[in-house]
Amino acid sequence: MIIYTPLLEQEIFEDEEQHESFHWLNVNHATVKLRRDVENNSFEIVHMTSTNPSDYLQKHLQPGSIYYL
């Protein structure tokens, strides 16, 4: 079987342990994968998926960006 997707293999077939520490969020029609940092009460973007090429140029959607909630 062939799967055509922009997601990484680890994101499709991930372990249950990893599933608890990551969250998916839609920001301006782009989907970002966030990793929670409990110490700083923040989230870091790990991966961004979008069909719009201009989303990849947005600094606030780049992997490594930090969000505080």
Image (spheres, rainbow, N blue to C red):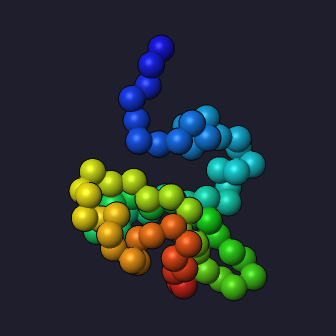
The percent coordinates of residue 16 (x first, y second) are 71, 43
**Quarter of image, res 44:** bottom right
Residue displayed at 75% across by 49% down = 17
Query: In this image, 39 relative to 13: left or right?
Result: right
The percent coordinates of residue 42 (x first, y second) are 61, 80
**Quarter of image, res 5:** top left
Residue displayed at 70% across by 51% down = 18
Query: In this image, 25 relative to 37: left or right?
Result: left
Residue displayed at 50% across by 58% down = 47
Q: Nearer the viewer, residue 13 or 64?
A: 64
Above or below 19: residue 61: below
The percent coordinates of residue 63 (x first, y second) are 51, 67
Q: Nearer the viewer, residue 43 or 57?
A: 57
Please give the count of numbered marks on the rendered protein. Answer: 0
Residue displayed at 44% across by 25% down = 3
The percent coordinates of residue 46 (x first, y second) are 56, 62
Above or below 31: residue 67: below
Report the residue that reaches farthest toward the top: 1
